[in-house]
Amino acid sequence: MRRKLIVLTLALGLVLLANLRPGCCVEGASGRYSPRALHLARLAASRAAEEIIPGGGALPRLRASWRLSLRQPEDSVPALTRAFLSRIPGVTVRSEVRVNGVALGTVADGEALKEALHVNLYVGRPAAAVSSRYTEELSIVPVFTRSDRGMDESRMLQLIGNLCPVMYIDREGKIIA
């Protein structure tokens, strides 16, 4: 009986050992990541830093703690890459403005620009207009870029106003000039 108990304990231990997965918790990123995801994120961050900063930025050393778990670790390489990139000196997150998918430039505060663009839709709106929109498709997306790049929001507003004017529409669906 004692021999069976030892064999059973050994078998359960081997099954448990076979199902344990290594995972890494990295400072600045939530979740546990596999060793493969950590390697790919470091590689992606270093290559992105080389493109952003001439000569490449120094990849930061983030504290990592390794653990074994029965759960599968996350393989979210983009989230981990963002954690590395956000700590590289000279690299910052800015809001890139795109018109019909073509990048115009970056601004520091994308939310303030969105508010100003929304206000622009209603300034000078004719009384007969029931709706207004920009003539081109605008998008504002976060991107990593050099800290010393970008333009101020007022200059970007002028540029957007020149490229995509506001279109006013009346109750019948006709465009008001």
Image (spheres, rainbow, N blue to C red):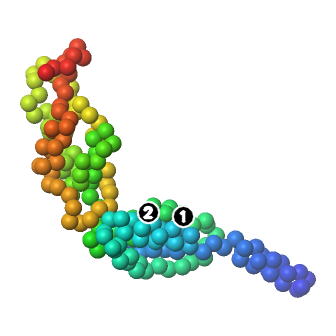
Q: Quadrant of the C terminus?
A: top left
The image quarter in which residue 16 lies: bottom right
Q: Front-most of 172 and 92?
A: 92
The answer to whether residue 118 is left or right of residue 126 is right
Q: Front-most of 24 and 90?
A: 90
**In the rendered image, the vertical position of residue 133 relative to residue 129, given as above or below:** below
Q: Is residue 30 visible?
A: no
Q: Are marks 2 and 1 in contact (CB under 8 Å)?
A: yes
Give SS at disc 2.
helix
**In the rendered image, the vertical position of residue 121 relative to residue 176, given as above or below:** below
The answer to whether residue 45 is left or right of residue 143 is right
Kind of residue at badge 1: Glu
Q: Front-most of 100 and 8?
A: 100
Residue identifier under label 2: 79
Give SS at disc 1.
loop
Q: Is residue 124 visible?
A: yes
Residue identifier under label 1: 74
Q: How far separated are the C-alphas under marks 2 and 1?
A: 10 Å
Determine the residue positioned at 26% across, 65% down: 146
Kind of residue at badge 2: Ala
Determine the residue positioned at 15% across, 51% down: 153
